[in-house]
Structure formats: structure tokens, C-alpha cells
Image (spheres, rainbow, N blue to C red):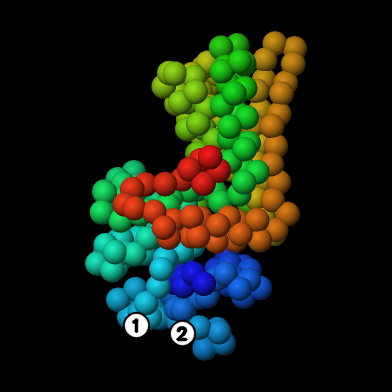
């Protein structure tokens, strides 16, 4: 049985992971981390990683970028694999994740869904075929409590497309102040926040007299929860290094 620490256990995704883990005989959450200590949890909850007393095989984080440094320090000190699912990291924070992966196993992905990662691969393929003459726009939709915009998944899609085109694309998030035609080197990224939308992503390739749209819609947070658990199982036996969904799928 895989023993796990769950960071962000009080959030929506944390509760989804805890529920999925409880239904399986393969996982045990030995401790949680959350800003609010929840006495109703089936496992002890602390506010800081350094307050954890239980031993674990892996840590899953679905919390807030502000917690990253303390998690990296804890992971390095304990030689503990980290599954980082939180989005909204800065470039400097991502650099620190890469540095930590030189000492411990780190799994980092902006989206834990199998379907979304397939969407990214399809978008990369479409960009290679159509990218020279088609404009590319990404629309992402999430619930009204999501803090970061654009979503980490939208940026993953844009980065994948940009890499497949073999040239540097620039991302445009807002055109209301622009009075000029769209440039061919742009990838437009647009965010919608409302209601209880779990997560929807559309990748639009708009060309001369035709439009191709690739779409993914998550119906439940369990999609991401099971992806995080699969990543934890995968990472627990790995040596130091940086891993992603592509490593898990291949």
C-alpha cells in the first residue's frame, strides 16, 4: 500500500483525491496539509510540512503556489518524491522545481487528465499540419473559484503547439486595447470563469474558409484525482529527475 501525504487536502481537489484513495486498497493517506486543520478528516492534518510526523512514500500537492518552497525543502530533506499538481507557478518557481528534481523525483503537470494530455498531442500534430496558414486560439473555462488565469492547461497546450511549430510564438491574453490586425505569430488565450464548470478547453485552428476545433471537457474532478494517484504510484519507484504525464503514458 502506497503511503501518501496530501497537501491541500481541504480543497476541492484534495477532497476528491482523498475520496478516491479511500475507495482503493492501494493507497493510504497518512497525513494532510492545509491552512485549516480539519478535525473531520480520516487522517491528521497540519498547516506546515515541517509539522508532519508520519513517514510516507510520496507527497501529492494540490494547493497554492505559495506553499511550493516549503514543500520542496521538505521533499529534499526527507528524500521524498513530490507530485506537484498545483497551477499558477511563476517562471522562477518552475526553475526551482527543476532544481529540486536534480535531487529528488518530481512529477510536475498542469493537468492530470489522460484526455487533456491526448488533446495536447493532437493539437501539436494539427499545428504541424496547419500551423503555417491557420490562426490558433485557445479558450479555457473553469468554475468561479479558480484563482489563476489562464489555466495551467491552456499554457501547456500553447507551449506544446509552440514547440511543434519550431518557432517562437507569443501569447496574447487580451485584445480590447489593440487596434491592429492579428499577427500570424500569435496564439490567443482566453479565460472564462463561472458557476461550477470543472474544466473545458477548446483549441481553434481558423484557416481560409474552414475551422478545426479540438475540445476536451472534464465531467468530474475524479478525472484529475485518479491521474494524481496514478502519478504517485508511478513516481514512488523512480530515481531523481523531472517527470510529466508523457512519461506516465509512454
Seen in the picture, residue 154 relative to 223 is either above or below; the reply is: above
Q: Please tell me the numbered disc located at residue 44.
A: 2
Seen in the picture, residue 250 relative to 168 is either above or below; the reply is: below
Q: Is residue 223 left or right of residue 241?
A: right
Residue beneath the point at 60% across and 11% down: 133
Residue 36 at what x, y percent from top left? 46, 80
Residue beneath the point at 70% across and 37% down: 215
Q: Residue 70 sits in which quadrant?
A: bottom left
- Nearest the viewer among 46 and 35 is 46
Which of the marked residues, 1 or 2, is nearer the chain's N terminus? 2
Q: Please tell me the numbered disc located at residue 53.
A: 1
Q: Is residue 75 left or right of residue 4?
A: left
Q: Secondary structure at mark 1?
A: loop
Q: Residue 167 sits in which quadrant?
A: top left
- Nearest the viewer among 152 and 2 is 2
Residue 144 at what x, y percent from top left? 62, 58
Seen in the picture, residue 85 relative to 7 is either above or below; the reply is: above
Looking at this view, name the residue that lies furthest to the bottom: 39
Residue 17 at what x, y percent from top left? 58, 67
The answer to whether residue 146 of the structure is visible from this angle is no
Residue beneath the point at 41% across and 22% down: 168
Residue 8 at what x, y percent from top left? 48, 69
Q: Secondary structure at mark 2?
A: loop
- Whether pointer 1 and pointer 2 mark residues with C-beta atoms closer than 8 Å, the reply is yes
CA neighbours of label 2 inside 10 A, class few (<14), some (14 to 19), many (20+): some
Residue beneath the point at 51% across and 72% down: 1
Amino acid at each position: 500500500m502506497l503511503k501518501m501525504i496530501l497537501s491541500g487536502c481541504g480543497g476541492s481537489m484534495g477532497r476528491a483525491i482523498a475520496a478516491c484513495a479511500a475507495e482503493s486498497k492501494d493507497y493510504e493517506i497518512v497525513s494532510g496539509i492545509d491552512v485549516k486543520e480539519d478535525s473531520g478528516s480520516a487522517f491528521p492534518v497540519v498547516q506546515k510540512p515541517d509539522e508532519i510526523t508520519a513517514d510516507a512514500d510520496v507527497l501529492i500537492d494540490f494547493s497554492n503556489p505559495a506553499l511550493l518552497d516549503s514543500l520542496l525543502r521538505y521533499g529534499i530533506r526527507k528524500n521524498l518524491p513530490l507530485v506537484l499538481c498545483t497551477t499558477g507557478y511563476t517562471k522562477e518557481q518552475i526553475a526551482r522545481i527543476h532544481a529540486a528534481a536534480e535531487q529528488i523525483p518530481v512529477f510536475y503537470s498542469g493537468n492530470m487528465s489522460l484526455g487533456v494530455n491526448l488533446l495536447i498531442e493532437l493539437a501539436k500534430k494539427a499545428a504541424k499540419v496547419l500551423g503555417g496558414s491557420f490562426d490558433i486560439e485557445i479558450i479555457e473555462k473553469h468554475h468561479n473559484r479558480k484563482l489563476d488565469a489562464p489555466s495551467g492547461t491552456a499554457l501547456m497546450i500553447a507551449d506544446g503547439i509552440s514547440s511543434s511549430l519550431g518557432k517562437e510564438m507569443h501569447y496574447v491574453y487580451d485584445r480590447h486595447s489593440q487596434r491592429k490586425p492579428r499577427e500570424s505569430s500569435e496564439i490567443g488565450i482566453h479565460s472564462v470563469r463561472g458557476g461550477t464548470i470543472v474544466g473545458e478547453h477548446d483549441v481553434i485552428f481558423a484557416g481560409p474558409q474552414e475551422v478545426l476545433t479540438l475540445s476536451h471537457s472534464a465531467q468530474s474532478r475524479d478525472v484529475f484525482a485518479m491521474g494524481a494517484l496514478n502519478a504517485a504510484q508511478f513516481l514512488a519507484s523512480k530515481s531523481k529527475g523531472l517527470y510529466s504525464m508523457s512519461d506516465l503514458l509512454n
